[in-house]
Image (spheres, rainbow, N blue to C red):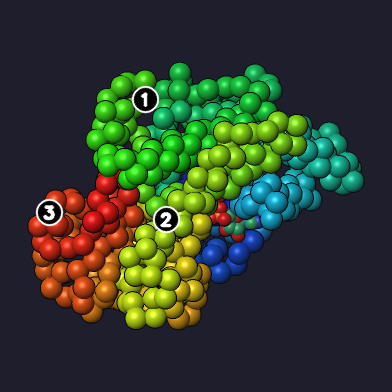
Amino acid sequence: MKICVVGTGYVGLVTGTCFAEKGHTVCCIDIDEERIGKLKKGISPIYEPGLDELIERNQREGRLFFSTKIRDGLEGTQLCFIAVGTPPADDGRADLAQVLAAIDDIGSELSHSCYIVVKSTVPVGTGTLLCKRIKNHLRERGMEKINLEILSNPEFLKEGMAIEDCLHPDRVVVGAASDEARAVMRELYRPFVSEEKIIFMDPASAEITKYAANTMLAARISFMNEIAQLCDKVGADVLSVKKGMASDRRIGEYFLNAGCGYGGSCFPKDVQALCYIGEGQGLDMTMASAVSKVNRKQKELLQIMMRERFGEDMEEIEAAIMGLAFKPHTNDMREAPSITLIRGLLNCGASVRAYDPIAMDEAHRLLPDNVQYAADIESLLAGADCAVIVTEWPQFKEADWEKFGGLMKRKIVFDGRNICDPEKMRALGFEYYCIGRNMRP
Ligand code: NAD
């Protein structure tokens, strides 16, 4: 098949490259000239394990192309994917500006029938809105005979595992009205999943499915964070509680880790957007709004623990921040708990030094200028009053605390991801704080 993908962020670039990997001919479009310039040279603008090799090989073998011109992508295409960003607006709703710009671009150039597939996460009814909008463009250009159908095909990939998720998805959700569209999507995804894993539904249900799935996952995290706070109050261990809960097959083990809050480009904005959609229909959205509320509080927790330990004035404190990305294996720092923490510590006068295996460039862009950066864990911890673990990178899990303790001014660790063994840390002479494990000395 010939496919056009509009938007080369995490979703567009990864899905476009994976379609090419399965033999389709794919042209990825972006308005960002620098990004497209790099991609043409085989340089990926995002960090995703395995992505560089796939881009390079599929480009070399003539299945993957990049352009800033929508016309290049639309030529002869059967499917045109929209995978641009839908960031949160100030009031919490999804900002559709990029999606509307993309449909306008398509509408001003399209000259043959095709299916337009919305991969971006969008509110219910967006498919209908886009259909009206593109038909207006076609009418103005005297092209109303072109046959179009707008499909919804929300994306469920996880950053850091995006290639694996894309090549072997748990399921593919498709919102489509016609049998013909369903047949094309079945053919597209045949090399990726068995047929029973392609779940067809109406477009509105597909649009809601994405928000509902993300809110459910975020809810599990927020619920465990609330349980962790209770554990801290009553002297229980949230990891034992998790083990006891997770062994029930109806509950399972995923997304039950208590910590310093969830971040990223999806959970915070999608939970908020679901609230906005529901409230617009006159519903309270009590559960979804509680999920956001708990998470906002949770992102403050590490700095509250540090203020309790060091006092409100932290002028004398040198804090070493371990991890900046919102989760391991990505350089994405959107809505990362590290940002809330670092801003809070700087406000209290602390000196902040930070290290992340791959998110340092992002950090320079997003964090205040007075943050210092270390080149490795050793230089991060040397002379620090405390280490604060914010991202559960494997290299932090495997840290040699006996050695690192010797480099620090004071042996104090705040573990926002519960990755250290409290008993071992104590035995090594650390003052060790973590989340929901009754470990506040
Ligand atoms: P992103 O912000 O990383 O990338 C969006 C890209 O679209 C940018 O490169 C931008 O330059 C480009 N763009 C904007 N307007 C354009 C236009 N008119 N024409 C061409 N290109 C344009 O976004 P992302 O993280 O890839 O997310 C895309 C969508 O997928 C969002 O709706 C998001 O909620 C959803 N989603 C994201 C993830 C994730 O893990 N990042 C997972 C599932 C779903």
- Mark 3 residue CB less than 8 A from any atom of ligand 1: no
Give the total of numbered labels: 3
The residue sitting at 19% across, 68% down in the picture is: 411
Read off the residue under disc 1.
251
In this picture, is 419 found above or below 353?
A: above
Q: Is residue 19 left or right of residue 127?
A: left
Q: Residues within 10 Å of mark 1 (few under 14, many from 20)?
A: few
Q: How crowded is mark 2: few (under 14 residues within 10 Å), some or many (20 or more)?
A: many
Asked if the residue under mark 2 is in contact with the one under mark 1, i.e. CB atoms within 8 Å, the reply is: no
Distance from disc 1 to disc 2, alpha carbons, whole Å, reads 26 Å
The residue sitting at 27% across, 45% down in the picture is: 437
Say which element carries label 3.
helix
**x, y percent for residue 402:** 11, 65
* Residue 395 visible in the picture: no
Task: Report the amino acid beneath label 3.
Answer: Lys
Read off the residue under disc 3.
424
Task: Report the amino acid beneath label 2.
Answer: Leu
The residue sitting at 26% across, 32% down in the picture is: 243
**x, y percent for residue 239:** 26, 39
**Earlier-in-chain disc, 2 versus 3:** 2
Task: Report the amino acid beneath label 1.
Answer: Ile
Nearest to the eye among marks 3 and 1: give it: 3
Q: In which quarter of the image is the N terminus?
A: top right
Read off the residue under disc 2.
301
Instruction: Please tell me which residue lies in front, 241 or 47.
Output: 241
Instruction: Please tell me which residue lies in front, 52 or 159.
Output: 159
Distance from disc 3 to disc 1, alpha carbons, whole Å, reads 30 Å
Asked if the residue under mark 3 is in contact with the one under mark 2, i.e. CB atoms within 8 Å, the reply is: no
* Residue 131 visible in the picture: yes
Q: In which quarter of the image is the C terminus?
A: bottom left
Say which element carries label 2.
helix
